[in-house]
Amino acid sequence: MSDGTAAVDAAVRRFYAYRVAMGAGFTSSFLVAFLAARDVSFTAVGVGIAALSVVNVVGEVPAGYVGDRWGRRLSMLLASATYAVIGVGWLVARTAPAVVALYALSGVAVSFQSGAASSWLYETLAEFDATERYSAVAGRSLSLLRWTQVVTTLVGAGLFVLAPTYPFVASALAGVVALAVTWTLPATERFRDDGERDRSSDEVEDGPGGERVGPLAAVRAMRTFVRKPAVRTMLAFSGAFASAIVVAGRYVQPVVDRAVRADGLAVASVDVPGVVVLGVVGATYTAASALVVDQADALESRVGRGPAIAGTYGTCAVAMLAPAAAWYGPVPLVTAAAVAAVGFQSLPSVASVLRDAYLHEHAPSLTRATTMSAVALALSLVRLPVVLAGGVLADALSPAAAVVGAGASALLVGAGIVAVDGPLTVASTDGTDASENTNASENTNASENTNASENEGGETESTAD
């Protein structure tokens, strides 16, 4: 094994450890139901999620600039520290303003992490000419994150039964551990203090023109990136489905919880609390996600990147329609909701890995984190009205109606985008969009001609994805 191979493998292992540390989900499967039990309205939850999106809109580009100027790892450290604070906050939140404030703080954490983590991975692989490993490594890292979520989701449900405060304390402690693990990640080459150059100083140049990487240069790179036709199509399509997934993920929890309370659920003559059912459902779809995301690279090789993205998102939206089977058929609502949750929560990570690989190939190198943060910003703008509408619909009709409405809306909007713009395209081997080959000079950034490779974050997974 060469020194270069050993070095990149060591860096990848540390990234895997980072993903595991960030994967703790002790409260994720019952958070909304927990808040509802504290008399927090679904509208307040919707406003909180919208506040998260607003903070993304305001903070994404500045956070991305922090990553481009002072290093990806610093941005990731700030995100880890913020998540630790949020874990404590959910423990004491009992009012709508507190819930909205914590969701907004979550937006800060998402902003710092969204472009930085994927940029760190891509640039670390690029140092060793190993960018072809991006999809495989990113998929494996998300798989490890999901398996961590499986374990912590089940543990969190058990801790909740013992005492409602326990899973929130565990979540805060997990944030501290994540902070320590993030600190062990090596800085990427541009931000390494090796005595050869300080790429975080004002002397950094952006491309052959010698332009400083200042705020204006970052904004220009961001604007050029999002104006690419194929990038716009990808953002619009993925934004529609990702927004629907966020809404459905929030309101499927109270659907399951209310169904268990109304109809009861017994296993071996033992009544099962709703929080345990939520924990099992969450563990199931997270385990399914861990299995399928590890195959993202293989799926791309088999059917192509565009069809893989469209197919996985479309399947998610169809799964959201499952609760309607309880309205018009003999299927119990708790069963229909559980099937929906497993379906639409297990596949988005596959689409996000492939989408990120696609977008990284289009982004300029020196403003990578800012550009990818612009992607998260665009997705947040799309998500904002959707989550507000979801909260209002859940209060006016029911949480189940919000889940079904989100899926139906995503299918209609996605079909419209494909009808207008055509099928999702992939990057050609020269770094330009397949649809732009006839006039590439009008759509590529000058700095991309020397280094056309990049990606996008999210998901979020935060969050957002």
Image (spheres, rainbow, N blue to C red):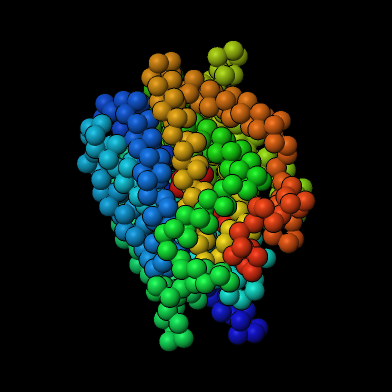
Q: Name the residue at 69% across, 56% down.
A: 441
Identify whether 177 is placed above or below 197.
above
Q: Name the residue at 29% across, 42% down.
A: 102
Q: Quadrant of residue 361?
A: bottom right
Q: Name the residue at 59% across, 47% down.
A: 227
- The answer to whether any part of residue 44 appears in the image is yes
Q: How many marks?
A: 0
Residue 297 position within the rendered picture, expressed as x and y whole percent measured from the top left: 68, 56
On-image quarter of the N terminus: bottom right
The residue lying toward the viewer, choosing from 295 and 390, is: 390
Q: Quadrant of residue 103?
A: top left
Residue 187 position within the rendered picture, expressed as x and y whole percent measured from the top left: 45, 73
The residue lying toward the viewer, choosing from 452 and 446, is: 446
Residue 317 position within the rendered picture, expressed as x and y whole percent measured from the top left: 60, 31
Q: Name the residue at 39% across, 74% down.
A: 201
Tell me if 199 is positioned left or right of 287 in this view.
left
Q: Quadrant of residue 135?
A: bottom right
Residue 454 position within the rendered picture, expressed as x and y whole percent measured from the top left: 59, 60
Identify whether 4 is placed above or below 465.
below
Tell me if 57 is positioned left or right of 313 in this view.
left
Tell me if 285 is positioned left or right of 362 in this view.
left
The residue lying toward the viewer, choosing from 202 and 139, is: 202
- The answer to whether any part of residue 427 appears in the image is no
The residue lying toward the viewer, choosing from 95 and 425, is: 425
